[in-house]
Image (spheres, grey):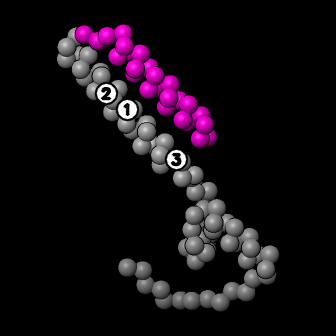
């Protein structure tokens, strides 16, 4: 658990506070953790859009489906053109999702 042993008072202009608040919101943090990270010279990055979580779930599902098709094809040594087409369609869908969300 974090032990806070020192506290400081800092006075900011309205413009400085607005900039700090905007930086914190962009990083998806509250103001206090933002200040700590800035003091420790941590490079703050913008928080990824919420769509990224959905994109990752979709890509995971597609990867799982492709692995199942590959396993089945290797086990039976037989795969239909429709199954190849379905796998290619999944890959195309993943490509479009990534392209639309970047």
Residue picked out by circle 2? 67
| Real-space CA distance between mark 1 and mark 2, rounded to the nearest whole angstrom | 6 Å
- Which mark is on residue 50? none
- In the rendered image, which quarter is residue 85 located in? top left
Q: Residue at x 52, y 47 (%)?
A: 52
Secondary structure of residue under mark 1: helix
Q: Visible in this render: residue 36?
A: no
Secondary structure of residue under mark 3: helix
Q: Is residue 62 magenta?
A: no
Classify the position of the N terminus by image quarter: bottom left
Residue picked out by circle 3? 52
Q: Is residue 91 magenta?
A: yes
Which is nearer the eye, 13 or 73? 73
Q: Are marks 1 and 3 in contact (CB under 8 Å)?
A: no
Q: Are marks 1 and 2 in contact (CB under 8 Å)?
A: yes
| Real-space CA distance between mark 2 and mark 3, rounded to the nearest whole angstrom | 22 Å
Q: Residue at x 46, y 22 (%)?
A: 89
Classify the position of the C terminus by image quarter: top right
Category of crowding for the residue at label 1, using alpha-carbon neighbours closer than 10 angstroms: few (below 14), some (14–19), many (at least 20): some
The first of marks 2 and 3 along the sequence is: 3
Left or right relative to 18: residue 66 = left
What predominant SS class does the magenta segment belong to? helix
Q: Position of residue 45 (x, y in %)?
A: 60, 57
- Which mark is on residue 63? 1
Q: Is residue 33 above or below residue 46?
A: below
What residue range appears in magenta? 78-102
């Amino acid at each position: 658990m974090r032990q806070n042993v020192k506290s400081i008072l800092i006075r900011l202009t309205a413009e400085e506070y607005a900039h700090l608040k905007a930086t914190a919101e962009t990083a998806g943090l509250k103001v206090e953790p933002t200040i700590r990270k800035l003091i420790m010279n941590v490079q703050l990055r913008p928080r990824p859009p919420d769509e990224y979580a959905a994109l990752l779930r979709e890509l995971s599902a597609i990867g799982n489906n492709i692995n199942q098709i590959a396993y089945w094809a290797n086990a039976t040594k037989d795969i239909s053109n429709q199954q190849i087409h379905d796998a290619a369609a999944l890959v195309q869908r993943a490509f479009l999702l990534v392209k639309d969300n970047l």
